[in-house]
Image (tube, helix red, strand yellow):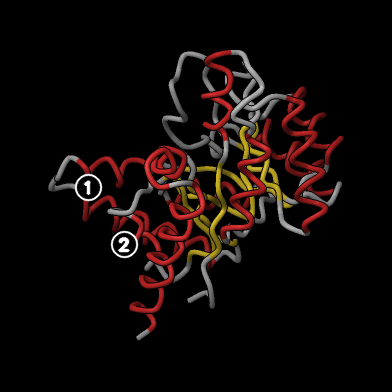
Amino acid sequence: MTSSLRLGVNIDHVATVRNARGDGYPDPVRAAEMALAAGADGITAHLREDRRHISDADIDALAVITRRRGRPLNLEMAVTGEMEAIALAHRPHAACLVPERREEVTTEGGLDVAGGHNLIAPVVRRLADAGIRVSCFIDADVLQVAAASAVGAQVVELHTGAYCQAVRERSRHAEAILGRLKGAAREGARLGLEVHAGHGIDYETVGAVAAIPELAELNIGHFLIGEAIFIGLGPAIQRMRTLMDEARATRAA
């Protein structure tokens, strides 16, 4: 079991609200500063090709404030030449390679690393050579875990969306999906990868995910931004942090 579980806060959807009116507020950079003050271990932002939420200027500013505070910026990015150039220009602490389709509402599944080896491996190498820690966002599939290791990624982030949706729908498949997450996490650790998880996690689902002993980090965004409407961003993050810590402590006991 990893000694502690980090929390990365994704601030994309502060930008979604800002962009709905085309004004300068709410400011996702201010949200990032508040998240760090509330106990987030790092900031995650997805610069999509269509710029539907986070903008290039946001990445510029986030790179500055995270570097100044000594906290990691995790840049989620598609495997494209444009995004690679942006990552190499900013050199964030981490780059998480994700699938991206313009018609999707949000990321709907993991990156097919096994099928895209020849495209992905050179990008991973160039990013890693620049000192960027490279992660692949994948489904909980041991074949994809092995493929991520084969392309040279240092980290895998397991897509928890299917599990979280199954819990919310009270599906009888939830435990089986959780079992696949656990199996993929074990395989990642066996291969020497650092294992993260994220997508769709809320207060109801975080406990079971956080208790997976091989996980080193959770990345959570949409739920926290939504909860902040009611209780504030700081308290929402602090509550999530408490639930994560409780789940990890219970597992260790």
Residue 213 numbered mark, or none? none
Residue at 46% x, 46% y: name it: 232
- How many C-alpha atoms fall within 10 Å of the one at disc 1: few (<14), some, or many (≥20)? some
Question: Dividing the picture into quarters, in which one does residue 194 lie?
Answer: bottom right
Residue at 42% x, 65% y: name it: 244
Callout 2, which amino acid? Ala
Residue 208 numbered mark, or none? 2
Secondary element at image label 2: helix
Question: Dividing the picture into quarters, in which one does residue 168 lie?
Answer: top left
Secondary element at image label 1: helix
Label 1, on which residue? 167
Q: Position of residue 70 (x, y in %)?
A: 78, 59
Callout 1, which amino acid? Val
Do the residues bearing badges 1 and 2 touch, measured as CB atoms within 8 Å? yes
Residue at 80% x, 30% y: name it: 86
> Is residue 240 toward the left or the right of residue 132 in the image?
left
> Is residue 53 toward the left or the right of residue 142 in the image?
right
